[in-house]
Structure formats: structure tokens, C-alpha cells
């Protein structure tokens, strides 16, 4: 029998520097590769144009010089390169390979960013932080920081359905983030738009702002808005062409912080279509009060949900994952582990094992990072 030859991939590594904005390419054939840079170079950006599927970890000096360049003129880097820098920083940070301080310093340039790609990349990673850190000591401080970096982009995109296509695309992303991070001005504006619609049926809520308006109005805490969203959702059930709006309404309904309303919504979950079950449970579990409530609901309705989704199915695993995937404490991990054991065998086990690994990573990351985030925001 011939010995197995280890497989190695050869792939191109391209980069730009502050001295030369022309992409240089070299081939990565072995476990490492060495190349020379001129002494006067301040920073290097590897994977220029995001042509390769790999992450790049720089030394501290290079990160700092990149951060300074972004603050001075973020246009030095293409939009794709800015996306790559933000994505790499958050991903490496969550893997405990890069400090939170570097990641936060990197995104501090965002008030001057108006390109859809870099902003949405940062907001999606920050949304994960919002869910994971919701019980941590740094959460309130982080909330104030995120609201501060969203302030200028929110003012620029505004609430009117006007502007160039890029602004129109960016508007719902920025405003929804402002609402989810509970910016009082954004919530007040969303509430006012829905109130105008309730007072005058000829008033129109722009389709690309519906989820923003529904979510903000529900987060205002006024019962009439939650009830409107529920009535509207109920009227659209069984209407295939309105499936997008139904999901938007469900996600908004699930984000209420009122425990009684959360419980009322949960009482209807077993009757919902499978894809809507996942959406509403993920929304509820993302709130400070809803995580524990959703877990108790899952345990109480285990056999009903199992019968609806299929024992051991991927769909049933997605239901469990939607409630548990943002867990960030040892208790969350142990609870998920017991649910995985109860789940038994089936094609959905792979999904649950991935969720278990993700929650374990969350637990370690939060324990390492929450103090660093608190201290950084306090200083800045």
C-alpha cells in the first residue's frame, strides 16, 4: 500500500501597499511564503480586491496604520477591501486571534462611510455582538458607541424615500440597526410613521422601510402598535404574494420586550408554517427577556414541534438552533447540550453540533472580551 501523500493547495496571494496601489501577486505553494517589502512602507493589505477565500491576520503595527489610513481617507481602500478588513477583523476577533480594541478602532471610521457593502458588513457583525452580549457588563456601553457611529449615516440617509440607488439600499439597513440598538430618535420616528398610517389610511409606508417602522413601533412599548402588527399579520396569512411582509411583521412582533406579549405570540407558534416558526423564535430569543422564555416554550412544546417538523429532521434542528445559537454563558451551553442529547439521531444532528460549537465559542469569547470592550468604550 502506497503511503498517503499529504494534499497541499497552491493559491495566489495578492496585496497592495500605501506606496503602490497596484496589485502584486505571489504564489503560496508551501506552509509559508516570504517576500520583501520596501522599508518605507507603512501598511500592506493582503487579499487585495477580496479575490481569495482566506482571512488575513496582521501584526499590531500594520493594523494601526490601516486604521489611521481609514480615518484619514477611507477611499484609499476600495469598497471590497474595506469589506474584507471589517470582515477579517470581526471574524478573527471572535476566534480570539485579534483584540476587541483593534476591531473597535477599525470600525470607528464608519460615520464617514456611505458605501452599502462595508456598512452592512459591520452592522451584521455588530448585530451578532448585540445578541451575544445582551447580558454582559459591557452591553450598555457598547450600545452607546454603536448609536454614536450610526448617528451621521442615519441623518444622511433620512426617512424619506428619496436619493440615489445606493442611499435607497443603505437606508433600511442603517435605520433598522438604529432601531435595534434602541436609538430613541429612530424609534420615535418609526412610531410616528406608523401612527400617521393608522390615522390616515391613504398614508403610505415605503416597502423598504416596513420592517424598520414595524420594529421601531413595537419597541416603543405601546400596545396598539403590537396589536396592529398582529392584526396585519393575521390578515396576510395564506397570501403567498405577501410572504415577505408576513415575515417582517413576525420578526417585529417577536422583538417586543413585554413578557406577556411574548407569551401570547408563543402560544400561536405551533400553528405557524415551519419557516415562520424559526423566524419568530429567533426574534423572541434575541430579546433580554425572551431567551429563557423561548427555551421553556421549546421544552414544553417539544413533542408538538417534533411532530410538526419531523423527529431528527434538519427543520426541527433549525428550530432548536434559532433559540439557542446566540447563547453565551455556561448555562446556555449546558442547556443546549441537554437538548442535543434529547434530539437523538437524525440528519439534523449536524446542524445542532455546529450550533453547540458556536455557543462554546461564544462563551469563551464573551468571558475574554467583555471587560476589554467595556474599557475601550469607556475611554473613547
Image (tube, grey):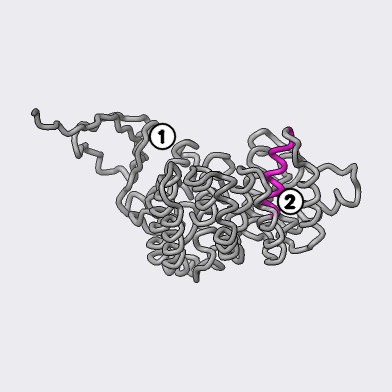
Q: What's the magenta region?
A: 241-253
Residue 71 visible here:
yes
Q: Closer to the camera, 87 or 366?
A: 366
Q: In terms of depth relative to the viewer, which is nearer, 11 or 103?
A: 11
The residue singled out by tag 2 in the image is: 214
Q: Position of residue 290 (x, y in %)?
A: 61, 63
Position of residue 128 relative to residue 206, above or below, is: below
Image quadrant in which you'd find residue 27: top left
| Residue 51 in picture, x, y percent from top left | 39, 31
Helix or strand or loop: what does disc 1 sit on?
helix
Q: Is residue 247 located in the magenta-colored stretch of the structure?
A: yes
- For marks 1 and 2, the one nearer the N-term is 1
- Horizontal side of 10 relative to 153 (left or right) equals left
Splitting the image into 4 quarters, where does residue 28 fall? top left
Q: Which secondary structure dominates the residues rendered in magenta? A: helix
Q: Where, by quadrant of the figure, is residue 253 drawn?
A: bottom right
Q: Secondary structure at mark 2?
A: helix
- Residue drawn 46% across the image and 39% down it: 76
Residue 98 at x, y = what percent? 35, 55
Task: Measure the C-alpha gap from mark 1 to mark 2.
Answer: 36 Å
Q: Is residue 145 visible?
A: no
* Mark 1, residue position: 50
Mark whose residue sits in front, 1 or 2: 2
Amino acid at each position: 500500500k502506497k503511503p498517503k501523500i499529504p494534499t497541499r493547495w497552491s493559491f495566489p496571494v495578492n496585496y497592495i501597499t500605501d506606496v503602490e496601489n497596484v496589485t502584486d501577486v505571489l504564489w503560496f505553494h508551501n506552509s509559508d511564503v516570504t517576500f520583501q517589502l520596501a522599508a518605507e512602507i507603512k501598511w500592506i493589505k493582503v487579499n487585495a480586491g477580496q479575490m481569495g477565500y482566506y482571512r488575513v491576520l496582521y501584526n499590531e503595527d500594520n493594523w494601526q496604520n490601516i486604521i489611521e489610513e481609514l480615518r484619514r481617507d477611507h477611499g484609499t481602500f476600495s469598497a471590497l477591501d474595506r469589506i474584507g478588513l471589517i470582515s477579517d477583523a470581526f471574524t478573527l476577533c471572535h476566534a480570539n486571534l485579534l483584540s476587541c480594541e483593534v476591531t473597535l478602532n477599525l470600525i470607528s471610521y464608519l460615520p464617514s462611510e456611505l458605501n452599502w457593502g462595508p456598512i452592512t458588513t459591520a452592522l451584521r457583525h455588530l448585530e451578532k455582538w448585540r445578541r451575544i452580549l445582551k447580558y454582559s457588563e459591557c452591553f450598555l456601553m457598547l450600545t452607546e458607541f454603536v448609536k454614536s457611529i450610526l448617528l451621521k449615516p442615519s441623518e444622511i440617509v433620512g426617512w424619506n424615500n428619496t436619493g440615489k440607488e445606493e442611499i435607497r439600499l443603505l437606508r433600511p439597513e442603517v435605520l433598522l440597526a438604529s432601531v435595534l440598538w434602541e436609538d430613541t430618535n429612530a424609534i420615535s420616528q418609526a412610531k410616528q410613521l406608523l401612527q400617521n398610517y393608522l390615522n390616515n389610511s391613504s398614508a403610505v409606508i415605503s416597502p423598504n422601510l416596513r420592517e424598520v417602522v414595524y420594529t421601531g413601533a413595537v419597541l416603543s412599548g405601546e400596545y396598539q402598535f403590537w396589536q396592529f402588527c398582529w392584526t396585519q399579520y393575521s390578515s396576510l396569512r395564506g397570501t403567498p404574494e405577501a410572504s415577505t411582509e408576513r415575515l417582517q411583521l413576525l420578526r417585529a412582533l417577536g422583538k417586543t420586550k413585554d413578557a406577556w406579549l411574548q407569551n401570547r405570540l408563543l402560544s400561536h407558534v405551533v400553528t405557524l408554517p415551519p419557516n415562520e416558526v424559526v423566524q419568530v423564535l429567533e426574534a423572541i430569543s434575541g430579546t433580554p427577556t425572551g431567551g429563557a422564555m423561548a427555551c421553556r416554550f421549546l421544552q414544553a412544546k417539544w413533542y408538538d414541534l417534533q411532530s410538526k417538523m419531523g423527529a431528527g429532521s434538519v427543520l426541527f434542528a433549525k428550530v432548536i438552533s434559532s433559540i439557542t445559537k446566540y447563547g453565551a454563558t455556561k448555562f446556555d451551553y449546558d442547556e443546549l447540550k441537554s437538548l442535543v442529547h434529547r434530539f437523538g439521531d437524525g440528519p439534523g444532528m449536524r446542524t445542532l453540533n455546529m450550533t453547540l460549537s458556536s455557543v462554546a465559542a461564544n462563551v469563551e469569547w464573551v468571558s475574554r472580551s467583555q471587560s476589554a470592550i467595556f474599557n475601550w468604550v469607556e475611554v473613547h
